[in-house]
Image (tube, coloured by chain):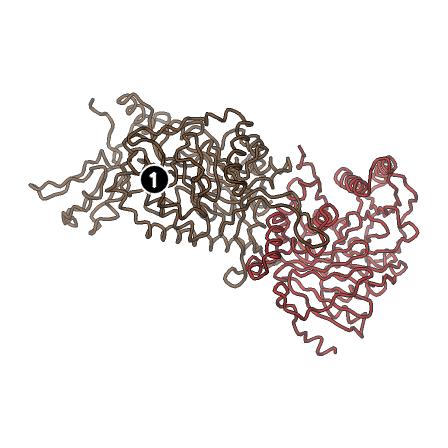
Amino acid sequence: MKTYLPPRYIVRRDEDRCIQCLVCENQCSFDVHQYDAGDDRVYARDDRCVACHRCVTFCPTSALGIGEYPLDFRANHNWRREAIEDVLKQAETGGVLLTGMGTDKGHRVYWDHLLLNASQVTNPSIDPLREPMETVTFLGRKPGAAEIDPATGALKTGMPPQVRLGLPVMFSAMSYGAISLNVQESLARAATELGTLWNTGEGGLHPKLRKYGDNTTVQVASGRFGVDAGYLNAGRIVEIKIGQGAKPGIGGHLPGEKVVEDVSRTRMIPMGTDALSPAPQHDIYSIEDLSQLVHALKEATHYTKPISVKIAAVHNSAAIASGMVRAGADIIVLDGLRGATGAAPKIIRDNVGIPIEVALAAVDTRLRQEGIRHLASLVVSGGIRNSGDVAKAIALGADAVNIGTAALVALGCRLCQQCHTGKCAWGICTSDPALTKRINPELGARRLVNLLRGWDHEIQEILGGLGVNAIESLRGNRLHLRGLGLTDMELDTLGVRMAGK
Amino acid sequence: MKDLGHVNNPWGDDKVIDACSIFGMMDVSGKTFSGRDIITAIGSMHDRGNGLGGGFAVYGLYPEYADLYAFHVMYLSVSGKTEIESYLNSRFRVVLSEEVPTRRVRAIENPPKVWRYFLEVDRRLCDDDVEEEKYVVDHVMEINASFSDGFVFSSGKNMAVFKGVGYPEDIGEFFCLDSYEGYLWTAHGRFPTNTPGWWGGAHPFNILDWTVVHNGEISSYGINRRYLEQYGYRCTMQTDTEVVAYAMDLLLRRHGLPVEMAARVLAAPLWSRLEHLPAPERELYTSLRQIYGSLLMNGPFTVIVAHQGEMIGLTDRIRLRPLTVGTSGTRLYLSSEESAIRLICPDLENAWIPAGGRPIVGRLGDALPARRSGRSSLSKGENFPLHAQVQGG
């Protein structure tokens, strides 16, 4: 069928600069650049370009540029370019439109409407270069009170398992199969160096990465891939994945062709079979079922590891979170509307769930109203772009954040949203051996460590500016936030005042 | 489910930013003395306040009613008095009620009417002391959150708070404090930078027999408050200082922590210091911080916390506000400035600046705190040679 879809991007090549070195042709995994020996010229198939910028980045003579394909659609507020293109794609394929990464729609980003405070005159700001500044965070259930033995002065209260984070930022769950082993190794190495955690996602833990276990969250999701007693006990935290922000209520499907030998061994499924993650966990149809799984995992790990439960931020997250805490979850992970994915139906990604900022505010408030906030740590993800977002999330009430997209961007990702195609030119979201080689775990880890070191310094500067020297004094301290350009109802939901008030 | 929104000020950020003078003196032998000296001492730090708040706490001043709760209530209107008295009469047995004697002082303008009530709780309502105290706290919180024209600002046994808008020396004269005798006094002169000019907003802050005077700003107030609200405390006094009083009440009375541990919650040792401690201590302080991280008081502060038989001085852990300790005979002095101590005790035996985050505790019947000479790892930097001491000695 002839496609009616116009090209999305256009490749601009400066013929004076092009030396026909064919780097672009070699780098492009979407077969855009093609060398014509007769003409001694490189031509581009614009219709295949996804604007991943791999060729631009590696062109030795800076001969390349990528732009929006110059094509004005007839002005129509309802039927804009994307709506028309989506209809065309479905008319030509008859399927569910798939996409990757987080939604690119213009839902309000509340981080951009929140502003942090600073000290002036009445209290001194603190210089983190010269004074101690503490960003250490502990995840896990906390007792409501400490009981001290009056005779010995020792603590009588038993402490549930706690996980120490050097800074309140972890890496989001990204499974082996969705991302390559080299990317996972980059994350694992960086987490180990930074004293934080990476997360296996639901694809099991490759034997090569077991040595990073103390800095690993092992995930148990609906497909139960790679789960056995050894796996559960290899990690520092065990996470039950109920849902993710990019596709709440939707399962996953790793196509059989991606289940190569290593993936097959790690996921504990036969080679070449589709890895299907059901939409629900079929042993969790209610909150009491969740409680059973939480306690089964605690038994399996001998009560040495916090059990985390991850949900997508949806309309009644606050009530659900309360139930999860009462079901025994030691850590709650909320993944917001803008959370990313390796593959999701586009219509779900762009239309289901709520932004993480409001979900976080609602959950933190509800747990405090019920007097159970100390029983679980709160981790949020889905749209954290920089240390300012981290600080605002913590002020709204989060103990820590997870970053996925930011980490992948650090490794080269340009959010071209082609993860589901398996052709990632940056070698991130692919299992093609030729492409996965493009990520060197040592260099990848260096980029990730650099990123989070920078964020940690910035968080320290923010704390010092506020006149406090510990992250605990910012956590849940919404008085250090003000809202700008928000309605009364939005301010009320976020629990912050209007700037100037 | 608790309605945590039910407070006078739902945003809860009308904290008053203070830069103040504080003073405390205690005779650990229990010998009582009048308020004359402490008025002189706090008056000497006049310039640290701006006349928008002064106050005193006295312990041991009502020995004849030592078993009764002495509520001190300020009224802004006659109807407020009628309403609150009717509330008190229906919840407590009022043994004695009287207007608190005052003098006319030119500098004190538009004072509210101040009354005191000696109250007994019906023991049929409460099984034990813990329940009785909860009963009292709940009703103080209820009155202060629900009635607009009256305010309970002192609610302990055999102790009282006197406070208002004015310089502390004028407030002392207004309330005739030279005529009361107590074994422990604390005082406060206030420099609020935002000025509701409200008598209830002056220090000391009180719940049961706990009082707090505070110099500084608690930048962690927002989370300290949200944490305490989970335990039923309502922050109604439009200042950050009250969270210190409630935190102490929670940690010491309800959770039964020793004072030294409570101080380690409010001014937690740095993680980097814990690394050098022996394992049992390190684990204890780590657990305390994991449990009570939300009660860490951050920002510049010095507080003097007192309750029956005990006076505690504490600074933030990097000591961004001053505190000097003095001892002489059986007397313990805590002050923003050493000169104020020497003014009323010229032959002072010891004076030193304690390390940041390290509590100085005076306890009835115990020996006076001494300057630490050993270098335990948590008291590093304890011993600063004082120029004033060299000069004065």
Residue A458 appears in view: yes
Residue position for label 1? A179
In the image, residue B291 above or below residue A202: below
Of residues B16 and A324, the one drawn nearer to the viewer in this rendering = A324
Q: Quadrant of the N terminus of chain B?
A: top right
Q: Image check: A116 left or right of A204?
A: right
Give amino acid for label 1: Ile
Name the image quarter holding residue A42: top left
Chain coloured red: B
Q: Position of residue B72 (x, y in %)?
A: 84, 47
Q: Image check: B156 left or right of A490?
A: right
In the image, residue A431 above or below residue B369: above
Name the image quarter holding residue B33: bottom right
Q: Residue at x 28, y 24 (%)?
A: A88
Q: Image check: A484 left or right of A26?
A: right
Of residues A18 and A202, the one drawn nearer to the viewer in this rendering = A202
**Chain of the residue that carries numbered disc 1 in the rendered image:** A
Q: Position of residue A375 (x, y in %)?
A: 60, 40
- Badge 1 crowding class, 10 Å Cα cut-off, few under 14, some 14 to 19, many 20 or more, is many
Q: Position of residue A165 (x, y in %)?
A: 50, 49
Chain coloured brown: A
